[in-house]
Amino acid sequence: MFAYAGLIPQQYQSGQPNRLGKITKRGPRLLRTALVEVAWLMLRYNDWAAVTYARISGGQKTRKKIAIVAVARKLLMRCWAMLLHNQPWNPELAQPTT
């Protein structure tokens, strides 16, 4: 599912070294765009997203885009789990861990 959305890192592996690069950008561009836009909006209204974004970005301006794509991927993982188990969004499970 995540590979379909193109939100997984490219993998460069030759023997022992394993390097992960930028996202693959395979799949529908509209889906990736929508997930990233929703992730930006979640920063305002959802504590889980804000804490996750802050943890990944580490307060560095250069990691803003990396962090927002990571939040979008985590959002996609949660949506997939909700669809798989036929469950609604549970805000108590999405509380930030401190």
Image: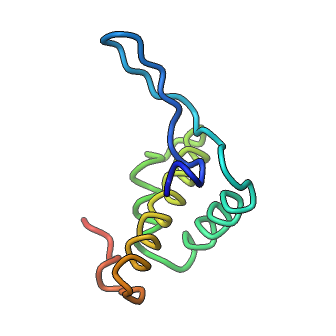
Instruction: Please determine whether, in this image, residue 18 is positioned above or below residue 66.
Output: above
Residue closest to the far right: 30
**4 relative position to 96: left or right:** right
Quadrant for the C terminus in the image: bottom left
Instruction: Please determine whether, in this image, residue 36 is positioned above or below residue 19.
Output: below
The foreground one among 46 and 1 is 1
Rendering coords of residue 1 (x, y %): 49, 57
The foreground one among 50 and 90 is 90
**41 relative position to 77: left or right:** right
The quadrant in which residue 26 appears is top right
The quadrant in which residue 25 appears is top right
The structure's colour scheme is rainbow
Rendering coords of residue 8 (x, y %): 51, 44
Disc tally is 0
Residue at coordinates 38% horizontally, 86% vertically from top-left? 86
**36 relative position to 43: left or right:** right
The foreground one among 75 and 31 is 31
Residue at coordinates 57% horizontally, 74% vertically from top-left? 44
Residue at coordinates 59% horizontally, 42% vertically from top-left? 61
The quadrant in which residue 68 appears is bottom right
Instruction: Please determine whether, in this image, residue 10 is positioned above or below residue 48.
Output: above
Rendering coords of residue 85 (x, y %): 34, 81
Residue at coordinates 55% horizontally, 69% vertically from top-left? 43
Residue closest to the far left: 98
Residue closest to the far top: 15
Rendering coords of residue 35 (x, y %): 62, 64
